[in-house]
Amino acid sequence: MVRLFGYFFGMACVLFLVAAAGIAIYLANVAKDLPDYAVLNSYAPPVTTRVHAGNGALMAEYAKEKRLFLPIQAIPDRVKAAFLSAEDKNFYNHPGVDLTGLGRAILVNLQNFGSGRRPVGASTITQQVAKNFLLSSDQTIDRKIKEAILSFRIEQAYSKDKILELYLNEIFFGLNSYGIAGAALTYFNKSVTELTVAEAAYLASLPKGPANYHPFRHPEAALERRNWVIDRMVENGYVSQSDGEEAKKQPLGVTARTTGPSLFASDYFAEAVRRQLIDQYGEKVLYEGGLSVRTSLDPQMQLAARKALQDGLVTYDERRGFHGPIKQIDASGDWGKALADIPTLSDVPEWRLAVVLAVSDSTVDIGLQPAKDGSGKVAADRQRGTIDAKNMQWAFRSADGARKTTKSPVGAVAPGDVVYVAKLGDDASTSYRLQQPPKVQGGLVAMDPKTGRVLAMVGGFSYAQSEFNRATQAMRQPGSSFKPFVYAAAMDNGYTPASVIMDAPIEIVSGGQVWRPENYGGESGGPSTLRSGIEHSRNLMTVRLANDLGMNIVAEYAERFGIYDHMLPVLSMSLGAGDTTVLRMVSAYSVIANGGKQIKPTLIDRIQDRYGKTIFKHEERVCEGCNAGDWQNQEEPNVVDNRETVLDPMTAYQITSMMQGVIQRGTAAGKIDLGGRDVAGKTGTTNDEKDAWFVGFTPDLVAGLYMGFDTPAPLGRGGTGGVLSAPIFNEFMQAAVKDTPESKFVIPSGMNLISIDRKTGMAAGDGDPNTIVEAFKPGTGPADSFSVIGMDSTMAPEEILKTSPQANQAVQTGTPGLF
């Protein structure tokens, strides 16, 4: 028996050694191809790029995986407790593999063998880190062995807190959210520190199977799983029994965040920033780099810009009549489902879609579009309202001519018509006004002239209607809003505001073609000063001035101001015949407003990488002495402005003064009222009134806009910059500057202010009523004799005498130099 026992014992030892050798060989085989776990030290997951307004408000987020990295110290204990209870309660005690949990899982799987149930796992948090970061998700023995080996090694190399930090920042929670910070925002629109016990428990239940516990598709399963996690938190001592019971009574409370920008009305601005970031850093950095972008957007100014442009576009569009319904549906039965399926202008929340239910001579009965919940289910309630005839009178005329003009709602709309409406009165009111999205469009930009920071940008009536940004992408002719740069070039090259130019018909012959420019309205005024040419936007004077000055000089200035990259030096360009953008025009006017300093327009103030390091900033000026360690009676720090001067400051003031005249008595007279503030600007109207412009400024703010159809077409008689665009500028500027201190345009030192005759440009005599105070550079002044630039192009001297009493008087008194 002893020998037999010894024999079996020996055989067992041999078999054990053979098995151990086999296992050792197998483990060595598996381990030799294991990935290097040291890469966890340089963990840099795809992180969301966040774009903020100038005041820090969140504008937009860009990510392929919505993740925000949080260090373990920033994650509250109750959140950690929820995940430990749900996934690995022995995390801080086991060496990487929980042998107790593994044994329990083996027993359960043996019991379930042949039942078709999925095998129960026993992966620890460390094992999940190994799988998620270093291995595939294959359900194989080899992968599980590799996972265990790596877990032991990871535990030896990293602290428990570091491993938990990696886990909580990497895992997928569903709804395209990754990491606990991103999940808290996605599901509850909260930061991690604001999560309640119930909310933390629900998030902890998701990694096991986000699709199985979807808050809208499987709410019962989600609630059951969340409550299970809460019970485990109570069982493990993280939460008291009473707090646990209270938490289980709470609803899921999921309020999934929308995918659009968080800051209202910032869509066009945010998209322009996104394009710039892609151009600067590429798509990978934008969607995975975790950039923190601080933009120049002023949210309040943006709201004012949006409202002003929308008001102007809607006012113009309604004057042209009703375009008809958005769509037609059957309104005889339950119209709610059909109406709910029609997309709305999501960024125009003041308007709602409605279906016409009944029409009479005095009112229109409407049904309002019902809401949908997160699963797409249409709400059961059906809200109704009315449109009184007085609130839709503008629609009694058809814009397309398909219907005759009517005198009541009958004939304007019919049952089944889907239209937009806006509520009148308070929330309890059921009275609405008929609205329609305008077909005319436009773009508006507001900028700080001292820095080039774009404070507001609106690229059209609605981003949901059209993503095309007319402030930066639309290439339009600026028309007469380009003229100040022709006159600035002239005054930098020997002319003065009192120089006199002939305003009379002219023919330009080139290549056998004859060009006959005209003033708006067709009239001409004879000899007039440069100031008069700007104030009344005289095309004939501008062409003569550009011809006398030389178009090569005009082109050089236009390129210097950034209006064009390369301008064709032909005379028609002096009237704004070349295509440019609103942003470029506003930037160019900013140079005049700031006294001649070149600026770089910018939407972005600063960019930081995921670690908080600044990798871009717009401010290039240097502050000497700003970083002094202490004060030793030294001079105050001085910000050195090293920007290039592209326009004589004195010329800038002369042009500014002349454009003040545009508003006081010129083409924008009576359209701009900023309560006595200094303001200058210029209207612009292109051929056939296809584009209407206005660009203007105060000492601290420049704004410009155009209005026109996307496919250029006439705006109609009177569709000028002064009539259509100046009121929009006025509405915006009144809102933008109402809470800011008043400031005045500064007259550069050395300029001479001299009274001159408005028509002749000569020094005014005592008591002459037809005078104006004009600014002259040192060494210049009003002419001693009456001379006319461009006179001999079309008119004989006797013709001038007929059209100009001032010229006739100069001849009669023997004043030399007339001709």
Image (cartoon, grey):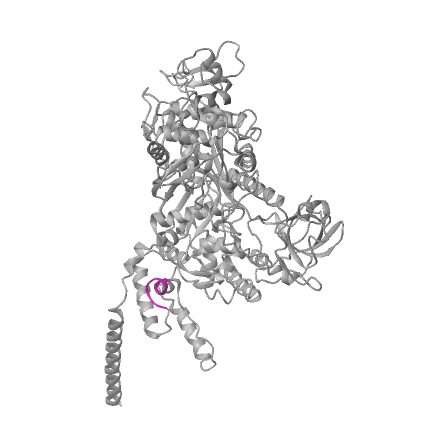
Residue 581 sits in which quadrant?
top left
Q: Is residue 746 left or right of residue 635?
A: right
Image location of residue 126, percent across then percent down: 37, 62
Residue drawn at x 23%, y 89% is 3
Residue 585 sits in which quadrant?
top left
User: In this picture, is 116 found above or below 654?
Assistant: below
Image location of residue 231, percent across then percent down: 53, 62
Q: Is residue 622 left or right of residue 236?
A: left
**In the rendered image, which quarter contains the N terminus?**
bottom left
Q: Is residue 781 magenta?
A: no
User: In this picture, is 147 found above or below 483?
Assistant: below
Q: Is residue 39 left or right of residue 450?
A: left
Q: Which residues are magenta?
A: 129-136
Image location of residue 701, percent across then percent down: 47, 32
Residue drawn at x 61%, y 63% is 377
Q: Looking at this view, is 728 or 531 the one in front? A: 531
User: In this picture, is 675 found above or below 98?
Assistant: above
User: In this picture, is 170 found above or below 485?
Assistant: below
Q: Looking at this view, is 150 or 598 the one in front? A: 598
Q: Looking at this view, is 686 or 748 the one in front? A: 686
**In the rendered image, which quarter contains the C terminus?**
top left
Image location of residue 726, percent across then percent down: 54, 34
